[in-house]
Amino acid sequence: MVPDRFAPVLAELAPLAARFAEAGFQLYLVGGTVRDLLVDSGRSDYDLDLTTDARPPQIKSCLSGWADAIWTQGERFGTIGARFGARTYEITTFRAESYSDDSRKPHVTYADDVETDLGRRDFTINAMALALTGSATPTLVDPHGGALDLMNKVLRTPLGPEISFNDDPLRMLRAARFIAGYELQPSEQLVAAVKEMAPRLEIVSAERIRDEFDKLITVDHPSAGLWFLYDTGLSDQFLPEMSTMRLEHDPIHRHKDVLTHTIAVVENVRPADEQPAGRPTFDFRLVRLAALFHDIGKPRTRGYQEGKGTTFHHHDAVGARMTKKRMTALRYSNDDVAKVTALVALHLRFHTYRLGWSDSAVRRYVRDADDLLHELNVLTRCDCTTRNERKARHLSKRMDDLEERIDALAEAEEIAAIRPELDGRAVMEHLGLTPGREIGEALDFLLEIRLEEGLIGEVESKARLDAWWSQRSK
């Protein structure tokens, strides 16, 4: 019996299923949609992936006259894409593909039954299909017990895990996402296979690893998946810094090693819709990545100072360089690398102002954070993982005070994008200069005044500029 929550999806697919049935072909809904409908995930933005015994030319024939658009980029792998209204579909011929040991590119072999197709999928929870043809009532096809595994919170592969992971090693990383996203417990055989086969990840492109890791880092609660990566040694293949952080002890968070603290900070970063009312929006994925990398420099900067114990001087600067190198290796965009690196470099800035914030300090904080101000504030708040409630309240109060100061200054003067009160053209006209190094130096001088004193007005700015130029020209 298919649950009632399947009804809207089934109603949407009924016309398409009828076309395949009239042509004498089977059609099944497969993949994450079946899984998420079974667990009642609350999602409504489903990807509708379908599989059929029809070959690609026959799929195109069934779609002709129904789809608004058809594309064939994946035809050599048995996949035809289509769009109807606002919805896109992918329809793939049953497959029984195999892989060579040194490549992720499949040798596509078509199958004649859905059970063979389901057997080549990654996990049992994804190896279920809903038959849309063949009977008046759609039926669940579940040859590997995926529904029971969902109910029992177990992650297994349809065939042996060695077979599944040898076919596509990225599935080992994908396992971490499903463990975290669906609160699943991996089978002993799956864990053993990942520990044994982790080096196979080397044949997977950095781009595919990055994309799958992004999916893990943005699930609601990623901790279990991150620990799975560490415990199995899989993280050593693409993020070896995780293991080094496990060995270093953080003197500030005495009850946690650095990796434990780091994963706790990642968890602390909650989606924007879980933030207190009135807080600005922020880039959730970037802050999660910054949380993961923020203490990456601690192992390399570990030292000892008499009377203070273990120290990690300049781990923010060292960590920023390490972050840039690692994210670049994972083929993150230049924009992502720059922003996450900046957040790592700035994550201690708030703590340098323990004696209070002057207006100048607030302006410099805002200027250095630039368009990452809200992301930096969220990261700073989430970096507090102390169990001492008094300390936690004190830190939160200090951040509240800073944000209030920023808002107050913003009302009095423009600080969202702090610039000198005179621009380059005005400086050249006033001093009678042409473009050159002196103009940059003059703007730096005026910017320093702007940061220290705020707005002083055009007349006073020009008087200060005259004095500076006279002194410089001597």
Image: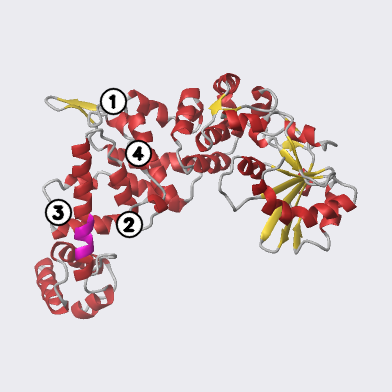
> Which of label 2 and label 4 is nearer to you?
2
- Percent across and percent down for residue 276 are 33, 53
Mark 1 or mark 3, which has the lower sequence index? Answer: 1
Residue 286 drawn in magenta: no
Question: Badge 2 is on which residue?
Answer: 279
Describe residue 310's horizontal placement relative to residue 11 as left or right.
left
Question: Badge 4 is on which residue?
Answer: 265
Residue occupying the point 11% across, 72% down:
464
Mark sitting on residue 357: 3
The rendered magenta stretch, by its main secondary structure, is classed as helix
Describe residue 258's horizontal placement relative to residue 9 as left or right.
left
Question: Badge 1 is on which residue?
Answer: 249
Query: Which secondary structure, mark 4?
Result: helix
Q: Quadrant of residue 351?
A: top left
Residue occupying the point 57% across, 35% down:
174
* Pointer 4 with pointer 1, Cβ within 8 A: no
Describe residue 92's horizontal placement relative to residue 21 as left or right.
left
- Percent across and percent down for residue 133 are 82, 46
